Amino acid sequence: MTEDRRPETPAEENGTVAVFVLIGRQLKLLRERAGLNQREFGALVGYGPDLISAIERGVRTPRPEFLRRADEVLQANGMFIAVIPQVEEAMTRARTRHPEWYRGYAVLEEQASSLHIYNNLLVPGLLQTEAYAEAVFRQWRPLLSEEAIAKRVADRMARQQKFEGWPSATFSFVLDESVLLRPLGGPEVHADQLENLVRIGSLRTVELQVMPMERAEQPSMDGPFNLLTVRKGEQVAYVEIHTYPRLITDAEEVSVLAERYGLLRAQALRPSESLDLIEKLRGRL
């Protein structure tokens, strides 16, 4: 995939970016006036510091419930509540744009009622912090421009809004332990990423499991894959190697990956054990 084929973020593509940038600037001004850093403010409104940063820079859509809470915490006297209709209109117009090779999967992911994801290379995009995602794209070859990196990170962060809706999809993730040991982006980025895994893994719609390095059996040595439940309970799979994607709809092929995923979950640590392990690794940094 060449750099010039990378599309804009939703806001850039349909002109709603001005709304989000203005809200972000106002939010940052009032937050700093209140003497709060992004982490402190995020704790008060229930968002991580990466998401606060993205909202303040206008690359992440501020949800109406976030605006209501921010208005209360920052004593904005209804300023953020007043813009909710404009935000909802912008969200209605927004359509996530992705590379042509990824677009079919992106639509299915957005609509899926359940997602099951296995990765033995890196943290899946849905679980990445902004800094971790940036580290991934900075290592991309051929090298990407600063603008291209910013666009790709924004697209990736936008996908994570799927955790916020209700009724929610359900999620499960199996990560190889090696993923947790690889300090992409450096110690600070690595530590924040582990913390984010614990945060998302603690959601009641999410089950996150770790496949220990010590396991003598590994039923999926072929690499990462995703399983999605879409229309009328139909299950599809998605695999990608060196940006060469494949959306699998054949029932027999999907059933093979579903069987592998079942074995992975059976052999991995339980969710509570997995979160304990991640917290221990975080504590050693």
Image (cartoon, grey):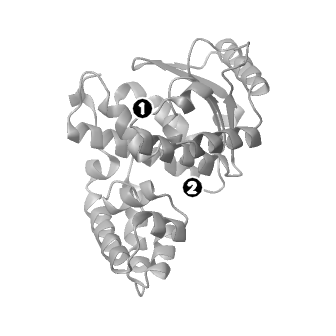
Residue 70 visible at all:
yes
Res. 96 in view:
no
- Please state which of residues 10 and 221 is positioned toward the viewer in this rendering: 221
* Residue 41 drawn at (x, y percent): 46, 69
Front label number (2 vs 1): 2
Residue 263 lies, with reference to residue 28, above or below; the image says above
* Alpha carbon distance from label 2 to label 1: 21 Å
Residue 244 at x, y = what percent? 41, 16
**Which SS class for mark 1?**
helix
Q: Amino acid at mark 1?
A: Arg
Seen in the picture, residue 199 relative to 185 is either above or below; the reply is below
Question: Which numbered marker is on residue 80?
Answer: none
Dot 2: element = loop
Camera-nearest residue between 192 and 74 = 192
Up-down relation of residue 10 to residue 24 (above or below): above
Q: In the image, which disc is placed on residue 103?
A: 1
Residue at x 33%, y 80% (from the top left corner): 33
Q: Residue furthest front?
A: 284
Q: Residue at x 40, y 80 (%)?
A: 82
Q: Is residue 106 above or below residue 63?
A: above
- Total numbered labels placed on residues in the image: 2
Q: Give the residue drawn at x 28%, y 33%.
A: 6
Q: Residues within 10 Å of mark 2 (few under 14, many from 20)?
A: few
Q: Which residue is mark 2?
A: 164
Residue 238 at x, y = what percent?
A: 55, 23
Judge by depth and name the residue closer to the eye, 238 or 272: 272
Looking at the rendered structure, the kind of residue marked 2 is Glu
Q: Residues within 10 Å of mark 1 (few under 14, many from 20)?
A: few
